[in-house]
Amino acid sequence: MREAWHAWVRVYALLWAFTLGGCVLVLVVPGGPSLARGLLPLTLTAAHNPPPNLAGVLSIAANNTLRSVWPLTLGLLDAQRRRATRLLADGAVMANLLVSGLLVGGAVGGYGVRVLAFLPHLPLEWAGLALGAAGWTTDRGRRINQHERIMTVALIVIMLLCAAIIETRLVPYR
């Protein structure tokens, strides 16, 4: 269990580093903020967000759960057994984290602090995403058992449900 905790801390920190890196990248590239706004056309107004409802919470949580849980299936597929499949799986998990972090960091770099009002859920969402990737990291080193896998999925679902509630309740809405 200790190695799983350490893996989660490392992956969580890495995800925040990717987010910071995306922000810094946008800010140091000449014309980066306007380019980021062009690539990520966000409408940061309350008028564009629907009022909170259960369907919205469940939709957001389901989408984020799919992005977070799939690394746990890699161990079930024995992806850690062969070097080639392990490297491919590592790359896919890393890409999932990198793209997520760079997109959010790019939005912060492009829109500035005003985007932060729309991201109160991010620490919990990143925690859930990191938990799935850390599950793979642990599984590739030593096979995790079914109980650990089920508990990890349950924790991810709980985290991401909480994140979705925060996202729908605390972001500005009409």
Image (cartoon, rainbow, N blue to C red):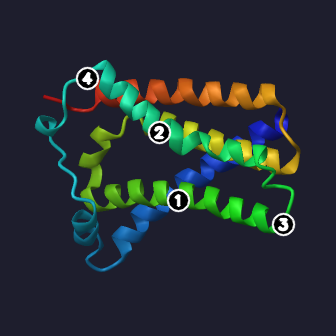
Q: Quadrant of the C terminus?
A: top left
Q: Position of residue 50 (x, y in %)?
A: 19, 30
Q: Position of residue 68 (x, y in %)?
A: 56, 42
Residue beneath label 4, please? 52
Q: Residue furthest bottom?
A: 30
Task: Kindly check if marks 2 and 3 are in contact, taking CB atoms under 8 A apart as contact.
Answer: no
Badge nearest the viewer, 4 or 1: 4
Residue beneath label 3, please? 83
Which residue is found at the position 70% from the left and 59% from the top?
A: 89
Total numbered labels:
4
Could you classify mark 4 by the number of other residues whose Cα lies within 10 Å: few (under 14), some (14-19), or many (20 or more)?
some
Res 9 seen here: no
Circle nearer the N terminus (2, 1): 1
Q: CA distance from mark 2 to mark 3?
A: 29 Å
Q: CA distance from mark 4 to mark 2?
A: 17 Å
Badge nearest the viewer, 3 or 4: 3
Q: CA distance from mark 4 to mark 1?
A: 30 Å
Mark 1 falls on what kind of element? helix
Which kind of residue does numbered mark 1 sit on? Phe
Which kind of residue does numbered mark 2 sit on? Asn
Residue beneath label 1, please? 18
Q: CA distance from mark 3 to mark 1?
A: 26 Å
